[in-house]
Image (cartoon, rainbow, N blue to C red):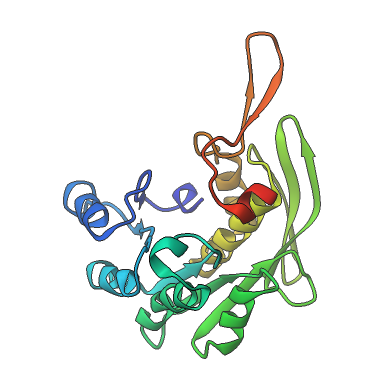
Amino acid sequence: ILGAKYPTLVTPASFNTPMGVTQVIRTQLEPRHRVFVAEMGARHVGDIRAMRRLVHPPMGLITSVGPQHLDTFHTQERITKTKYELIDALPEDGSCFFADDDGIVQELWKKTAKKKMLTGMNPELDDVWAENLQVSPKGSTFTLCFGQERTECETALLGELNIRNILLCAGVCLKMGMSGKEIARGIQKLRPVEHRLELKTNAAGITVLDDAFNSNIRGAEQ
């Protein structure tokens, strides 16, 4: 979405480890880029804290805190603590963005003293939210809302989880000075990640919803 206005580099595929992020920085990041979006994955406490030394982020997004990688973290509490390493890594004047899950992430938002934004589906609480969400074989449409502004958006992505992710990203875009129309243009260009709620039509004209990649209990439910 940021690419609709700024030359942007995003870590590809699952390049979300210290080695993967380092490889992207060394081989792809160029002086022309104005924005670098780095996914920070974690399998152990301290993993995100280690990557902050590579990226020095002024902004941080927390999409969810779920039961992933319990084989290495062992407890949900340790997962939550590790995710919050990103917020702790931001400078005092940094900006924090949280997806409103009415659960753990919302609690992290509540306890954060730094500049913060909450995004989701609740107009009573969220700074950025969606209204009039509609789904069709072509994808999803919704109204992007922030303050008194309303912008109609359409995307090939499906699933409330994806719309919530889009809203989180829209919050960052607003913070970086993009207009509702610019954000909508970026949203329209989004395409599904392969095998993740990917909408396909086979040779017989049958619509197939390919979510074969998914191994996340919460993601599968949504």
Residue 48 lies in quadrant: bottom left
44 and 22: which one is in front?
Answer: 44
Residue 217 in sight here? yes
Which residue corresponds to the image point at 63% horizontal and 41% vertical from the top-left? Answer: 157
Q: Is residue 220 above or below residue 57?
A: above
Q: Is residue 118 above or below residue 91?
A: above
Q: Give the residue at x 54% y 68%.
A: 65
Residue 58: x and y, percent? 37, 74
Q: Residue furthest left?
A: 26
Which residue is more in the foreground, 189 or 178?
189
Specify whether residue 222 is in view.
no
Residue 39 occupies quadrant? bottom left
Residue 60, position in %: x, y? Answer: 44, 71
In this picture, residue 43 sits left or right of residue 173 = left
Front residue of 156 and 8: 156
Which residue in the rendered view is the most extreme toward the right?
132
The correct choice, above or below, for 112 with respect to 207 in the image is below
Residue 96, percent from left and from top = 49, 76
Q: Is residue 17 left or right of residue 101?
A: left
Residue at 36%, 59% in the rendered image: 38
Total number of numbered labels?
A: 0
Left or right: residue 137 versus residue 47 is right
Residue 17 falls in image quadrant: bottom left
Give x and y (percent) for residue 25: 22, 55
